[in-house]
Amino acid sequence: MVILVEVIKWLEEGSDEAKDIVDLPWSVHKRAEGLYIAEYPKIPFVLNVVITEEFVHLIVPLGVETVALELPERLKVYHTLLILNEQLNLIKFTIKGMNEEIMLRVDLDRKTLGKGEFNDALTALLIGLNQVISALGLQEEFARAVFERIALMVMDRIEKGVKKEEILKFLVMKVGMGQKDAEEFLKRITEQVKPKGEVGYL
């Protein structure tokens, strides 16, 4: 049976040049007992890792709540999710919480889980995310959410006193921006963007 330390190690250890998602150096933070948050700037989602006695659950909140939708629109969304559940392997789309937020998730059995299957699960989540965004027409909303998440990363570094040169290096090396774009992005953040809460967390 895979142990908790191994799962976290798979995420934390790696290289920015890695070809497999699992081999990227994810930033992992413990939020509660058995709940970890993992992020990598070039991956467009926040990964919630929930570890129980028997399973490792990988969950990606989409940030889309369906509770306030009119019934015809809600049924259309649910129909789309059911079709995607049939088409895509490994992952499933679920609704969670009072606000009925759309989630992507993979449930992995700890008894047989290896690094290869873990990487397959991460890849499936990325593919599923792209599919559901396209199917629901959420490209603009998702792009804005990614912008806000990177902005929060930058704001956190500013608040911690990280030097401008280091933040620019982060934007260029980790996020993948060009030098000019990184400088403009940092300028916009410091002048306009204020923290808006946490995007993509359980």
Image: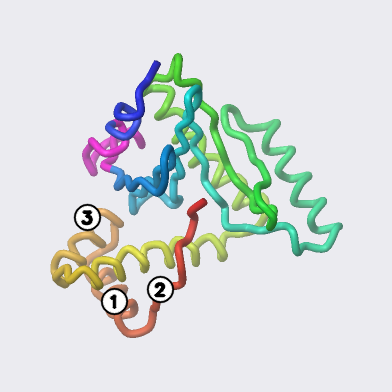
* Secondary-structure class at tag 2: loop
Separation of disc 2 and disc 3 at Cα? 23 Å
- Residue 141 position, x and y percent, is 57, 64
* Secondary-structure class at tag 1: helix
Using the image, determine if residue 58 lies above or below residue 54.
below
* Residue at the image point whose x is 43% and y is 42% from the top: 35
- Which tag, 2 or 3, sits closer to the chain's start? 3
* Secondary-structure class at tag 3: helix
- Residue 47 position, x and y percent, is 44, 45
Pointer 3 residue: 173
Residue type marked 2: Pro
Q: Are marks 2 and 3 in contact (CB under 8 Å)?
A: no
Q: Are marks 2 and 1 in contact (CB under 8 Å)?
A: no
* Residue at the image point whose x is 32% and y is 45% from the top: 28
Quadrant where the N terminus sits is: top left
- Residue 49 position, x and y percent, is 44, 39
Residue type marked 1: Glu
**Front: mark 2 or 3:** 2
- Which tag, 3 or 1, sits closer to the chain's start? 3
Q: Which mark is residue 195?
A: 2
Pointer 1 residue: 184
Left-right relation of 42 to 143: left
- Residue 99 position, x and y percent, is 68, 57
Q: Which residues are magenta?
A: 10-25
Judged by its main secondary structure, the magenta piece is loop
